[in-house]
Amino acid sequence: MRKYIVPDTIAISDSGFLFMPSTGETFNLNKIGKEIFQMLQKGGTEEEVFKYILDEYDIDKSSFEKDFSDFVAQLQKYTLIKEE
Amino acid sequence: MEKVKKRYERPIITKHYSGLMNKYGSRNISSPKSEIDGVLVKELVEKYDSPLFVMSEKKIRENQRNAYRIFKNRYPNVQFAWSYKTNYLDAVCSIFHQENSWAEVVSEFEYNKARKLGVKGSNIIFNGPYKSKPALLKAIKEEARIHIDHFDELYDLIELSETNGQKAKVAIRVNMDVGVYPKWDRFGFNYENGEAWQAIRRILSSKNLHLIGLHTHIGTYIMSAEAYRVAASKLAALAKSIRQEYNILLEYIDMGGGFASHNTLIGQYLPAEEVIPSLEQFADAIASGLFELPYKGEELPMLILETGRILVDDAGSLITTVIANKRLSDGRRAVIVDAGVNLLFTSFWYKHKITPAQENGFHTEDTTIYGPLCMNIDVIREGILLPPLKRGEQLVIDYTGAYNNSQWMQFISMRPNVVMIMEDGSVELIRKAETLEYVSEREIIPAKLKK
Ligand SMILES: Cc1ncc(COP(=O)(O)O)c(C=O)c1O
């Protein structure tokens, strides 16, 4: 099960505003994006994220799988997370 | 009891770029457009499929009445002539004719289309650089107003009128420097170098031609009202010379079309609403140029306007459906929709207003919209902020009423349905989607190639 490393210095506001102190970059996350990011930050696994989203939201597994891998690729591109 | 699940939206992250802080990743620019003229987009698509062109009867009539009122308030005698090439769907032309517009045509095909719709010859303005001799002859017989583009045509007309013993009713198209570039000097006779005056003299020396007006069309999507004042005053100067030297009064001055609509051009930074003169300003400019006419009161010639774009652009929308979401190699987001540039010709020069048809999230991403054609040029829009869209959801592309339903082409798929939302809210199919039979009907396979 894949896990990700998230620098713990990254701060996120309630509204999804994200600040990376090391580079001064800022980002915006939508609600689901924020929830997922925070789960990963707390050491949550991919499996846990899937379980949570499929439980809470009206979405099927394969659709979410596409969106999730796209989202993770974006986070990696911005060096906000690394694969463990 | 089963748990009620929350509405899902794809997770997104958007980066802020300095200086553009408030442009990125924040609010959706506008609320969704779930209906057009009170009819639900979802219902339109269920019944008529996607993509779907939608025209608004109400908007066309409003635009035409408004434009007439604005010009009539500034000049006593105003006549509009619907520019067929802007949108020649029969239903659209019919509205304009019901609103008392004549027809402005630029080809034999358009001429015949207008006649078929019941427009009489004398209410047709026949423009354009190519009018075949048979077309000219027909126009002479039906007393259409023929606007001469070049000397070869002028001599064709002299010859045709002579052999048929009927005088042709003519005007000349004049091109000129009005301070707008590029200069449209390929149509008609030039003002500054004296060619226009030469053409006028040639017409007036022929007993078979009847000079009834002067015409100009300075270009399309003109953003300067002043250009129209200059154009009107130059035509007024020609009218003055005609009066002084020949004591002839003209029936009309035709100022053409060209007023910019409220679509924003690609490369234009500010939205069109902020940089485009209002119709009132265009009308003021034309009226003030025409004040220089050497005519008074009753004598004043009719002002003809061949306004196209601004009268229908905002009366048309194109509904399109998301086929797929994609991430480009540089990380940008892209969506593929079911309408391509073969349908939306104007996407080559406009940044159309594009709005999701359903409630989507608050957050937006910089997105490129591609059409379904397997061609690199098929870009509906480069870089627009859109919320995450799901497959099967709709986008409404606004201001598509001008030039698309005449310049579209059948390419790798059929052209879709066009509907009109009528003033009473009912929906009428005004052009049926094409079929394979329709497209292949004109083709012939040589016997040798048949199996
Ligand atoms: C002769 C003539 N009249 C009128 C028009 C309509 O112009 P617009 O749609 O810009 O108002 C055109 C289009 O370019 C034209 O060529």
Image (cartoon, coloured by chain):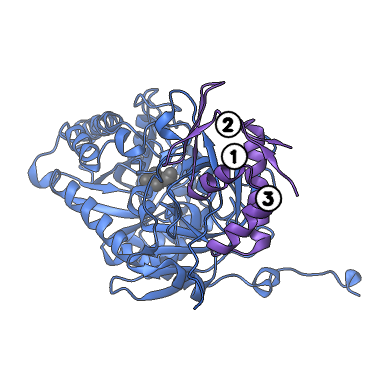
Chain colours: A purple, B blue
Q: Which residue is mark 1?
A: A41
Name the foreground residue: B332 vs B287.
Answer: B332
Relative to A15, is A68 above or below?
below
Relative to B177, is B172 above or below?
below
> Measuring 51% from the left and 44% from the top, which residue is drawn there?
A34
Marked residue nearer the N-terminal end (1 or 2): 2
Please tell me how many numbered marks the rendered image carries: 3
Q: Whereabouts is ligand 1, in terms of quadrant? A: top left
Secondary structure beneath label 1: helix
- Dot 2 alpha-carbon crowd within 10 angstroms: few under 14, some 14 to 19, many 20 or more: few
Residue B31 placement (x, y as % from top left) = 36, 53
Q: Chain letter of disc 2?
A: A
On screen, residue B211 versus residue A53, left or right, reads: left
Name the foreground residue: A16 vs B246.
Answer: A16
Residue B4 placement (x, y as % from top left) = 48, 70
Name the foreground residue: A76 vs B424.
Answer: A76
Report, in whole angstroms, how far the alpha carbon at label 3 lies from the one at label 2. 18 Å
Discs 3 and 1 share one subunit: yes
The label shown at residue B150 is: none
Report, in whole angstroms, how far the alpha carbon at label 3 lies from the one at label 1. 12 Å
Q: Which residue is mark 3?
A: A46
> Measuring 59% from the left and 42% from the top, which residue is drawn there?
A42
| Amino acid, disc 3 | Glu
Relative to A40, is B428 above or below?
below
The label shown at residue A8 is: 2
Residue B165 placement (x, y as % from top left) = 40, 58
